[in-house]
Image (tube, rainbow, N blue to C red):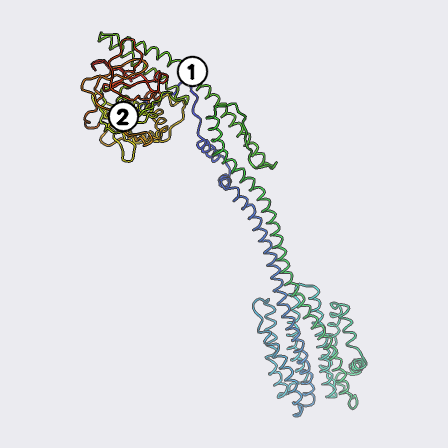
Amino acid sequence: MSQSSPAHTPAHAAPRAASPAAHLSGLRAARRTRPGPLTGLRDALENWRVSWRLIALIAVPTAMGLAFAGLQVSMAERNAQTMGRVERLAILGQQLTGLAQAIEDERDDTAGFIAHGRPGNGQTQLTRQYAVTNRWAAQVQPLINQLDRGYPAQTLTDAGAVLTSIDELPKLRQEAVTSTTPALTTIDAYTAALANLFSFNDGIALQSGNTAFANSLRTLSALSRVKDAASQQRGILYTAFVDSQFTPAEQTALIAAQAQQASELESFNASATAPESQLLSRTVSGPLMNQAATLEQTTVANTDNGTALNLGPGASHAWYTDMSYTIGRMRLAEGTLAGSVVQNAHALRSSAERTVIETGGAALLALLIVLLITVLIARSMLSPLRRLRQGALDIAETRLPAEVRDLTDALDTGRPLHVRPIDVLSTDEIGQVARAFDQVHREAVRLAGEEAQLRSSVSAMFVSLSRRSQSLLERLLRLIDSLELGEEDPERLSNLFRMDHLATRMRRNSENLLMLAGHEAPRRWADPVPLVDVLRAAASEIDQYERVELDIHPGVAIVGAGVADTVHLLAELLENATTFSAKTTQVIASGHGLTGGGAVIVITDRGMGIPEQVLAELNQRLADPPLADVAVSRHMGLFAVAHLAARHHIQVELQSPASGGSIARVRIPASVTSEEAAGGGRRPRAGAGLRMAGPRGPQYVPSRFAAGPVQDPPLLTAALDTATLTAPAPAPAFAPAPAPAPAGSTGSVRATGPNVIIPPADGPAQAAACPSTSRSSPTGSGPAAGG
């Protein structure tokens, strides 16, 4: 196709609008220049899909809720673990009270054994008490050894002290039995060992964190010390009763034990609840306990330091029995409190574990409810957004282009415009955007309708101007024909041929208006025309026809319906091949039929070639014909070839070989070709002229278009940019030429080529529309006019 220089933009033309991508790039660049530490983050978030942003909006508070819920569950779990440890300590404390009772009994029995002078028969009772103490120690030691590092350091220290006290028992026993240690010293040693047990029970209250439970533990510890003080008093007085002497040291120890008992009893009353106080009052009361208390008080009050005791026979044993009964009642109240403490610890642990389950369940349920509500709200936003996006894309990619095409192709441009709204019926911002897009859609369709009306008006003007111009040109051509037939002066005849050719080109320009308006030329031929005659007719319509050499194999013809368009298409290609190649070179048009139907025509020239980028663009336009617009006026040849080829499914491809020049390859489908009739395309004798019958009389053209040998194929330099478009004129069927018509005859059209005649196509009405072709002198020596 032809290569032309770029068209210059008029001075009054409006500047070209920036593309949307360039505009967006400018906006992004301007935003990046704005100060602000969060600009990059905001830009990144704005590029996220709305669904991802909503997911993030849901995920962030959900994650925070899970974190807080996990924190609450973790705290409840830690509290449950603490309560579990407290329960294990309470059980251990209950076992320690039993061990303390056994050690207290062992202490008092050992003091009595020493007071009796360590008799051999007295070890039997001690051995039995040692076994009781050992059984309690065997139950306590495994529980202490199970304590791990999850317990406070003070608790582990107290537990170690308890084990130490248990380990010291054999040594105390050995010293009490084999040595001369006084009974009071042995009592003090056993009391020190018992202190470690009471300290451990005191430490349990510090870990619970529950006030009521801690008070119960303190109450139990106070009662245990009250009982221990009473047991000390029993051991001290029993020793004094056996020795019948109350030493000052024993008196001091007894007074201290009594003071300790009174102090611990006050502590008990301060921390004990009313039921616990009533329990002790009911348990530690009665005649025997009163007798023991009375005897003890009397002994202390009536005895001076070192005074011998004279209680009478059996008094010491009776007092020991009464005092043991009192201590036993205290132990009964202590056991009841210890059991209550264990039950409370178990209840606290169960409550803490239940709190863990309830907290976790409530947190999970709350999160599920919040997540469900959030998802429902997000879906109420995403669903309209998806429908809006889908509707907008459907309008932009399918519906609006189809409506514009319908309006462009519609004959009745005044029909009402119906725009289907986007399926978003909400009244929120999304619905408002949908309504705004519907308004834009309606405005675009309205503008397309107005443009279609404008195109229709312009097409009507083109058709009107073309019809008027063609009518005048036909009259002019008939006048020129009549002058040519009656003229014998070669110089004047040559001038008449030039005028005839210029008028023919003017008529082709007029037919261009018909193509721009979307109309087809009304000329049609009913009979097939040989391919060689179609190429001759095409060559006769260009200015430099004498440079065209034909190499056409016989046997192929073009059907009548495609003759006019094929002649026009080939004329455009030939004209550009001759225009954009050196005048000293030849343009070769070769063609042959294809197996199975169809034909291939190759037009080559020795021009300057086509750049690869331009070649790809031209082939793209040939494969996809462009719409008629302002650019068509600068590329009429490309426009004509592309649309004529698309009309008959003809394939046109341009090539630019490395050897130089250009090649135009035209593949005509089987639907446009047929077999050549017998005698069709017969080559006339050398030097004979061609007479083509038409509305303007016989026209003579030289015989130089007779097919001849093809030389080295010059390649077509091609661009249809400057080619002129003529509405395709149907090529006529050819027959032997009759004698020249007389001057003034109006029954034939002259064309270059062999000596044949083209009768009027489909009667007089169509013969009037038969195209005029370029002319030469009857002898072939006259100048050729431009096509």
Element under label 2? strand
Q: Along the horizontal axis of the image, is 662 left or right of 299?
A: left
The part of the image, by quadrant, that contains residue 592 is top left
Q: Write the residue at 43% across / 25% down.
A: 16
Q: Quadrant of residue 784?
A: top left
Residue picked out by circle 1: 464
* Residue carrying label 2: 530
The residue lying toward the viewer, choosing from 759 and 95, is 759
Query: Percent x, y for residue 695?
Result: 32, 14
In this rendering, the answer to whether 418 lies above or below 461 is below
Residue at the extreme front: 678
* Residue 750 shown left or right of residue 51 in the figure: left
Q: Which mark is residue 267?
A: none
Image quadrant in which the N terminus is located: top left
Query: Distance between the Cα atoms at labels 2 and 1?
Result: 34 Å
Closer to the camera in the image, 106 or 711: 711
Q: Is residue 227 left or right of residue 542?
A: right
Question: In the rendered structure, which amino acid carries the disc numbered 1?
Answer: Ser
Vertical order, 72 against 380 (above or below): below
Q: Nearer the viewer, mark 2 or mark 1?
A: 2
Residue type (three-letter) at the residue carrying disc 2 = Pro
Q: Element at badge 1? A: helix
Locate residue 606, reporting x and y percent. Answer: 23, 26
Residue located farthest toward the right when viewing the structure as drawn:
287
- Taking depth in this image into account, of 271 and 470 the one nearest to the observer is 470
* Image position, residue 55 (x, y; %): 54, 46
Q: Nearer the viewer, residue 207 or 502?
A: 502
Q: Earlier in the sequence, mark 2 or mark 1?
A: 1
